[in-house]
Amino acid sequence: MDRKRLGNVQQTDLTEGRINDDFLFWLKTSGPNWLLAVLIVACVVMGWNWWKNRSAQARDLAWAELDAADIPSALKDVAVKHAGVNAVASFALLNAGDRYLQSVVTGQRFDREATAPDAQLTPELRLEWLNDADALYADVIKNAHASSGSTGRSFEISALFGRAAVAESKGDVAAAKLNLEEAQKIAGTSYPWLAGQAKARIDTLGIISSPYPIPAAPIAQTINPAVIPAGASTSDAEAMRLLLGDVAKTAGKPAADPAPAPTAPAPTPAPAPAP
């Protein structure tokens, strides 16, 4: 029994030694190649995770800066800085154009306090900001053509609506109609509510080209101009003339015949004296 057990132990030792020798031989021949492959895979996984984290951080930063930007110059800087991050550039350019257009519609400068003496837009600045808004909308359309998918089409439709509004503000009805027709065509059946809105705006363009006739103020030759306050605006003076004209018309009508005065009753004759 002792010899048999001793033989088994020796056989086990030989087997383990042979395994160790085979493993060491594998390490010397194929081990470095496998170890290099494992290291490459680990580096690829780590690099992919780093890139995903970096892209997420860049995307979060771009949207945060877009949300913080309020004036067109800041929005244009965001569009240039984050041109390749999602649709941040198109959003920024579209918001900048809307900011210019909103100031033109309200007549209030966005870079001035409401109580500032130069808070109101001048005709020159109004035209300049309309041109700037139109250029920004054109850039949005250019970016939409360079991209693909429904997002690009939605940005293009919004920019076409903006260019139509700019054309309407300039009184260019033909250009406004072309932009609205293009927006309606792109919207098609994908965005039926936008197509309907474009059609509704096209139908109302006639109001701009042919405004409703305003009746001329009646000419009252008997009106004394001195009754109109000095420094009154054109609209106030016209309203005053209309009011005074109505008064003059009323005053110029022939007076109605006065009602006949009631006749006094005939006096009762006194009785004759008795004889």
Image (spheres, helix red, strand yellow):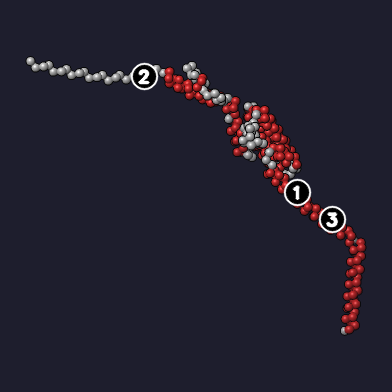
* Label whose residue precedes the other's in the sequence (2 or 1): 1
The x, y position of residue 29, in whole percent, is: 92, 61
Which residue was labeled with disc 2? 256
Q: Is residue 151 above or below residue 47?
A: above
Q: Along the horizontal axis of the image, is 57 left or right of 179?
A: right
Is the Cβ of the residue at disc 2 closer than 8 Å to that at disc 1? no
Q: Is residue 182 visible?
A: no
Q: Image quarter for residue 179?
A: top right
Q: Residue at x 65, y 34 (%)?
A: 109
Which residue was labeled with disc 3? 40
Which residue was labeled with disc 1? 55
The x, y position of residue 149, in whole percent, is: 70, 41
Q: Is residue 19 above or below residue 205?
A: below
* Label whose residue precedes the other's in the sequence (2 or 3): 3
Q: Along the horizontal axis of the image, is 262 left or right of 9?
A: left
Q: Residues within 10 Å of mark 1 (few under 14, many from 20)?
A: few
The x, y position of residue 36, in whole percent, is: 87, 57
Which mark's residue is nearer the viewer, 1 or 3? 1
Q: Is residue 223 above or below residue 9?
A: above
Q: CA distance from mark 2 to mark 1?
A: 89 Å
For the N terminus, the image quarter is: bottom right
Q: Nearer the viewer, residue 118 or 259?
A: 118
Which mark's residue is nearer the viewer, 2 or 1? 2
Q: Nearer the viewer, residue 167 or 19?
A: 167
Determine whether the residue tagged by mark 3 lies in a helix, strand or loop: helix
Determine whether the residue tagged by mark 1 lies in a helix, strand or loop: helix
Which mark's residue is nearer the viewer, 2 or 3? 2
Amino acid type for the residue under numbered disc 2: Ala
Q: Residue at x 64, y 40 (%)?
A: 190
Farthest residue toward the left?
275
